[in-house]
């Protein structure tokens, strides 16, 4: 047989190998949702793809048979028909080699070419556009499945028999995907540029949502804005109107004795009907929604949704008010902080130099990280928590304690009632 014809046959077999290798990669990399949508829209190839995918073992076996046969035939053809030609080629340049050595050299060269052009390149092409390539190749794959059905059946039966013989068929495989595996996929997708850092953070926040307790994200009682029902009515109305909140806890005598929640909208409705001077706060109070500090925020979110509460009162083990949580607080744990026209983070973080900032000690770490592009551990809720954790004592008002964390120098500037009010944060260059 002419060498040119042999080479053409070998190239065709390599292309066949590449076609089936790419088909395999495309079929296992498909987005099921996209294929289901195309099939629903009447795409015949998409319907065929779904049909083939219902028996993954069979189509993978079919493809493997096609790849193996193509590889075997190309090697056999090259070894048997090109050996003598290779011996003559080496003899022409003055080198004498046995035909066996020539066959080995041909096999190595052919294996390299097949690996590149028949495996790696086609698979990479298919991986970039799995849906498009699957649509293109599915009819040929399906026809191959029909033609090789007897051989695939024999291979399947033999494989199952061997597995049964070694006891593998008795091992139950766990097909559940773990949370860690999904997180790894999220990080891999981010590294591949499939989504931005904000999207990655949001997806990871969803997995943390059921691990966080209410006390970790609540507004502590020392920072809760509340109104004393015993105050003068005009003073209460003035405080409600001038506040930046739509719902405000109302207490009697002390903040632990919550009487209810006042909605600014209810105040305005009653004021519109009776006048501000005739508004009766006690009559329009809404029943408070109490939950313990230990409740997980995913359960709290579900309960607040079902019972239509926008604010919940967090109680400690002795029935005292520990803090409050709003629906907005819960949503922010997933999407990040939501700022409205009353929020001004620049008032909380004031730049005093190129790399120095005066920060409120109670500002959430999440806000600081996002505003200054830092990476402080989220195990700390506020700078106060970080400082106290590192110092292992509560700072004194007359002593400027300093904490070193990562590339940050954190200096306590003022302490009021055992609470750190102001912190000077210096970002040192790495």
Image (cartoon, rainbow, N blue to C red):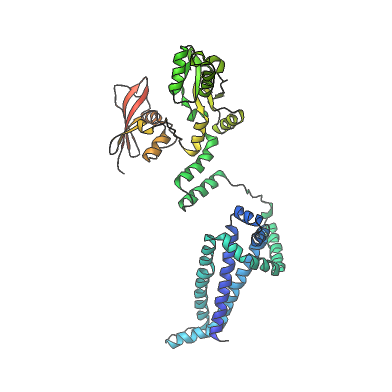
Q: Quadrant of the N terminus?
A: bottom right
Q: Position of residue 86 (x, y in %)?
A: 49, 83
Q: Is residue 274 visible?
A: yes
Write the residue at 50% across / 23% down. Answer: 264
The percent position of residue 392, horizontal first and vertical second, equals 38, 27
Residue sitting nearer the eye, 337 or 23 = 337
Q: Residue at x 51, y 43 (%)?
A: 203
Above/below status of 46 relative to 2: above
Can residue 225 be seen by looking at this rendering? Answer: no
Instruction: Name the residue rendered at 54%, 76% in the picture.
Output: 11
What residue sits 57% from the left and 63% below the top? 133
The quadrant holding residue 413 is top left
Q: Is residue 16 left or right of 385 when viewed as pictured?
A: right
The residue positioned farthest toward the left in the image shown? 353
Q: Nearer the viewer, residue 112 or 170?
A: 112
Give 10 or 367, whichever is nearer the viewer: 367
Q: Position of residue 382 (x, y in %)?
A: 41, 31
Q: Residue 248 at what x, y percent from top left? A: 49, 22
Determine the image quadrant of residue 34.
bottom right
Relative height, residue 363 to residue 31 (above, below): above
């Amino acid at each position: 047989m002419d060498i040119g014809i042999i080479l053409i046959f070998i190239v065709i077999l390599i292309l066949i190998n590449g076609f089936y290798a790419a088909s395999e990669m495309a079929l296992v990399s498909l987005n099921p949702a996209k294929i289901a949508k195309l099939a629903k829209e009447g795409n015949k190839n998409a319907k065929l793809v779904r049909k083939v995918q219902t028996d993954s073992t069979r189509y993978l076996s079919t493809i493997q048979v096609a790849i193996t046969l193509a590889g075997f035939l190309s090697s056999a053809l090259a070894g048997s028909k090109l050996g003598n030609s290779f011996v003559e080629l080496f003899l022409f340049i003055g080198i004498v080699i046995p035909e066996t050595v020539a066959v080995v050299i041909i096999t190595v060269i052919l294996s390299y070419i097949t690996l590149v052009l028949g495996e790696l390149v086609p698979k990479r092409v298919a991986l970039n556009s799995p849906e498009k390539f699957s649509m293109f190749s599915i009819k040929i794959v399906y026809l191959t499945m029909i033609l090789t059905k007897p051989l695939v059946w024999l291979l399947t039966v033999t494989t199952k028999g061997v597995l049964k013989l070694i006891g593998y068929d008795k091992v139950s495989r766990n097909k559940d995907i773990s949370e860690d595996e999904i997180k790894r996929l999220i990080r891999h997708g981010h590294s591949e540029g499939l989504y931005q850092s904000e999207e990655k953070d949001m997806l990871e926040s969803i997995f943390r949502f059921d691990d966080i307790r209410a006390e970790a994200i609540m507004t502590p009682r020392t920072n809760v804005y509340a109104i004393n029902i015993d105050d003068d009515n005009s003073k209460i109305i003035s405080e409600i109107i001038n506040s930046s909140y739509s719902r405000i806890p109302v207490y009697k005598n002390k903040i632990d004795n919550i009487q209810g929640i006042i909605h600014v909208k209810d105040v305005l409705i009653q004021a519109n009907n009776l006048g501000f001077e005739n508004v009766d706060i006690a009559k329009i109070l809404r029943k408070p929604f109490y939950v313990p500090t230990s409740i997980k925020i995913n359960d709290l979110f579900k309960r607040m949704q079902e019972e239509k509460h926008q604010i919940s009162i967090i109680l400690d083990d002795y029935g005292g008010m520990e803090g409050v949580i709003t629906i907005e607080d819960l949503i922010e744990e997933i999407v990040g902080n939501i700022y409205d026209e009353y929020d001004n983070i620049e008032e909380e973080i004031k730049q005093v130099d190129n790399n120095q900032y005066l920060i409120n000690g109670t500002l959430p770490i999440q806000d600081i990280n996002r505003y200054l592009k830092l990476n402080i551990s989220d195990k700390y809720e506020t700078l106060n928590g970080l400082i106290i954790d590192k110092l292992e004592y509560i700072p004194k008002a007359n002593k400027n304690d300093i904490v070193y964390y990562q590339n940050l120098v954190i200096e306590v500037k003022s302490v009021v009632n055992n609470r750190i009010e102001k912190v000077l944060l210096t970002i040192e260059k790495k």
